[in-house]
Image (cartoon, rainbow, N blue to C red):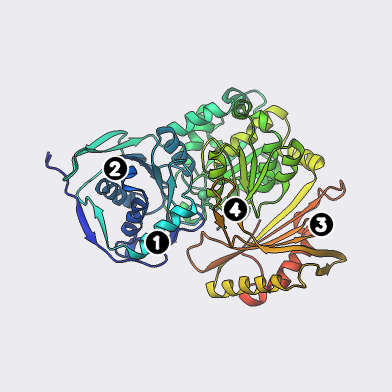
Amino acid sequence: MDDSPVPVVTVLTAPYDAQKPGTSGLRKKTNVFQTKPRYLQNFVQCIFGSIDLRDRQGSTVVVGGDGRYYNNAAIEIIVQMAAANGIGHLVIGQNGILSTPAVSCIIRKIKAIGGIILTASHNPGGPDGDFGIKYNISNGGPAPEAVTEKIFQLSKTIEEYSICPDLKVDLTTIGKQQFDLENKFKPFTVEIVDSVEAYTNMLRNIFDFNALKELLSGPNQLKIRLDAMHGVMGPYVKKILCEELGAPANSAVNCVPLEDFGGHHPDPNLTYAADLVQAMQTGDYDFGAAFDGDGDRNMILGKHGFFVNPSDSVAVIAANIFTIPYFQQTGVRGFARSMPTSGALDRVAKATKIALYETPTGWKFFGNLMDANKLSLCGEESFGTGSDHIREKDGLWAVLAWLSIIAKSKQSVETIMQEHWQKYGRNFFTRYDYEEVDAAAAGKIMKDLETLMADRAFVGHKFTVCEEEYIVDKADNFEYCDPVDGSVSRNQGLRIIFTDGSRLIFRLSGTGSAGATIRIYIDSYYKDACKIFKEPQVMLSPLIKIALKISQIHERTGRTSPTVIT
Ligand code: VG1
Ligand code: CO
């Protein structure tokens, strides 16, 4: 074997524009990463460049991805560049596989300086799909805006990057590999770890596995169906739910990670997880759940396909939080939701006198609150639920949280949800997504809306639809001042709040890879027993009409309906 040191080389490059991380990482069409010369290398160099040299030297970084097309080719480049940039130690999931929550877990466990996750999350994969990179910092959470901005600034002036092109790593075998590098005193090590082990151990310390085992494999077994949508969660579901907790092997479907997710959107919602919805409608299962490509999102369904809205899901977990042993130990410090998420959580916070924080969209805003011991449980309407056990949303954690509640209450998903509404009232919620709208047109729609909302007569304006009246109480562009570090994030979504508390929110997505996605979020609260069991689309129909009217979205995009309704 050749044991001469691995050469470190500097390669000249030139900047690309628009290497700006969005809500969570940089996402582009796969062929942008594959065919634009040095595109990935530039961005990776900027990630390493954002870390102070003294912190970077000899540090540990975690790397893994959701297994989508280009995952391992990207990891090879990252390994070669990490070595050349002074990183001392890489911890990589076997075969390049780690879910987003698992990366967060490992970063915290081994006190790594950060982590790189190869994923475009819920976006489709494959050569014609999307690829992406998320960068997480030492608390295990997505890089905050100050860091992503630094990365973006570096990407605009980059002239060269460092790489060890001859360094070849074996991703298949668990264990340590060591490399001597030219010009470096200390060897560079790569450690391949089991993709699910550390994460499984963590969950074991959070939940009562014996009670869950009894629920899933005891005499009164709950029949479950979990759909990994051919994303990264397959191995985690099989190991934790089937092997550890005893759910039958056929409870877990689509558990083989595929490079293109079988051609589907690995997005757990009623549209893209239609197979699961159908299977649940047969009545053969009591509990269903699906996950997204990188395992941080979850959708919860009850028997006959009863849908739990994610905004309600976090509220139910909050109301039953002490069924989870972890919180019995840590206590509950605070709750938080992203601004567009419905106010269901606020009702529980108020009743339990626990602080409630409202943050902009994206998990990065929760991390600061958690690090400052202000936050225990949080959620987003976009199928994200999690707690301060890590710094990412966590799909499987949410499933085990729900199963814990079922184990304790011995009630069905539907009954748990209905009793919750009876006690706290119900926030009806819907989201309309218009995907791949022309970016300029979308920008103009938002700009015109903002102008309309700024009109002095807008506050106080009365909309009358179907005999319902809505009077505008407040209209603004949401701005967040972080209570921990005082940083301000502007332009986080246009909000119209009516005097009865109902809300209309318009926001441009920050995770798309082509054109623009416009999201409209609608939220309205009712407490009357005769209203809380009605259909959200019916209850929200006047507000939906107002939203479509003031934005003129159909007229201006040529669409007749949204791409996805949640
Ligand atoms: C979407 C969701 C947001 C979520 C983000 C990342 O962002 O709305 O709530 O945090 O995706 O989710 P946007 O900007 O498209 O609305 V995921 O599963 O990447 O990690
Ligand atoms: Co995701």
**Nearer the viewer's eye, disc 3 or disc 2?**
2
Q: Quadrant of residue 63?
A: top left
Question: CA–CA distance between discs 2 and 1?
Answer: 22 Å
Q: Residue at x 59, y 63 (%)?
A: 491
Q: Is residue 306 visible?
A: no
* Between 484 and 468, the one nearer to me in the picture: 484
Which residue sits at x=76%, y=70%?
A: 458
Q: Nearer the viewer, mark 4 or mark 2?
A: 4
Instruction: Give the numbered dot on residue 481.
Output: 4
The x, y position of residue 198, in whole percent, is 44, 32
Density class for disc 1 (Cα within 10 Å; few <14, some 14-19, many ≥20) is: some
Relative to 227, 100 lies left or right: left
Determine the CA span between mark 1 and mark 3.
Answer: 43 Å
* Residue on which disc 1 sits: 153
Label 3 CB sits under 8 Å from any ligand 1 atom: no
What residue does disc 2 label? 57
Q: Quick one: label 2 or label 1, which is nearer the N terminus?
A: 2
Identify the amino acid type marked 2.
Gln
Place of residue 534 in the rendered image (x, y in percent of width and height, measured from the top left): 81, 52
From what the image shows, is residue 188 above or below residue 343? above
Question: Residue at left 36%, top 49%?
Answer: 51
The reply to whether residue 342 is in sight is yes
